[in-house]
Amino acid sequence: MTDRPIKMGIVGCGNSARNIHYPKLKDLRHQFEVVACYDVDGARAAGIADLYGGARPYTDRAAFFAHPGLVAALEAGKHVILEKPMCSTHEEGVRLMDAAKRAGKVLTVYHSRRWDPEFIEARWAVSQGHFGDIRMFETIVCSNLLNVEWLVDWGVHLIDQCMVICGGKPLEVSCAVTFPDKAETGGGPWTASIRLDNGRLGVASMKTGAIGSYPRFAIMGDKGGCAWPGAGERWTAGKLKFDEQELVTDLPTIYRGQGQEPLQLGETHIPVHAFYPNLHGVLNGVGELAVKPEEALVVIDVMRACLASVAKGGRVVTV
């Protein structure tokens, strides 16, 4: 394959196509060309087609895919990017991966919160060994989103962040939500604890309705720990600069424990391997896929375990 613009089709012309993917793709027209989009709502399909600059809108899946269905897209010889979450069940995810392997095509999932500036920072600091062996990683979001679908909205992002930092295989999950009778939709504030086979603990927590000053992450290892701040205030203050290739930031202090000098990292330049440039490289035979479908499937397994735990009153369930 030559290093030429890759033609893309978009399925679903709602908020994500307009406000999440377009801001990334509009500056990458030399790498990706959106030529078709599909939605059951003709006006939405036409609007996105116009936004992406002359793409052809479809309201008929048969015309878009040649025959209906996502597996059909893979079997028809198309690479596929899925929005998160990857699927609804483990079995569905396995079918998708099997179809991609049979077709020899790329299947990936847009886990966009891997590219939050503060997550790039924290992931880099962990990879450099500044915390030593990670024992616990907690990812925390506070918002006034009182009626969102907690698990498929922010939940999938936070679980994915836990898995990326902690690594290993999830063994057990316990999850508590404030309104368990609404567990499939707006469960309110919630916390999930994930125990992994490498001895690490991942904690995902959303403090819905609690607006205030909280750390974005809490990271603890055998060499130190840190309550990692969010990027917003530092960005506004000019202490953080971010693009598709590099993050320049003033990193927070990592504390080493009583009687030991803290680690002052200061201004740091961190390379960024953004989702779409990474995908373009992979499709041209360069680099390793940033989000592997196997990773996305583990997130689905943890999500299903969270719902099972909620149904049992927050008891521990196996993954």
Image (tube, rainbow, N blue to C red):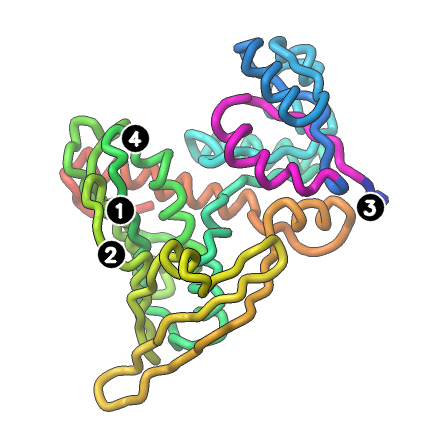
Read off the residue under disc 4.
148
Label placed on residue 14: none
Q: Quadrant of residue 88?
A: top left
Read off the residue under disc 3.
3
Image quadrant in which the C terminus is located:
top left
Task: Determine whether, in the image, residue 295 is placed left or right of residue 152.
Answer: right
Q: Amino acid at mark 4?
A: Val
Read off the residue under disc 2.
214
Query: Is residue 121 positioned above or below 254 on the image?
Result: above
Residue 209 appearing in the image: yes
Give the Cα distance between marks 2 and 4: 20 Å
Q: Quadrant of residue 152?
A: top left
Q: Nearer the viewer, residue 270 or 206?
A: 270
Question: Secondary structure beneath disc 3?
Answer: loop
Q: Are marks 2 and 4 in contact (CB under 8 Å)?
A: no
Read off the residue under disc 1.
142
| Residue in the image at 72% along x and 24% along y | 35
Q: Are marks 2 and 1 in contact (CB under 8 Å)?
A: yes
Give the Cα distance between marks 4 and 1: 13 Å
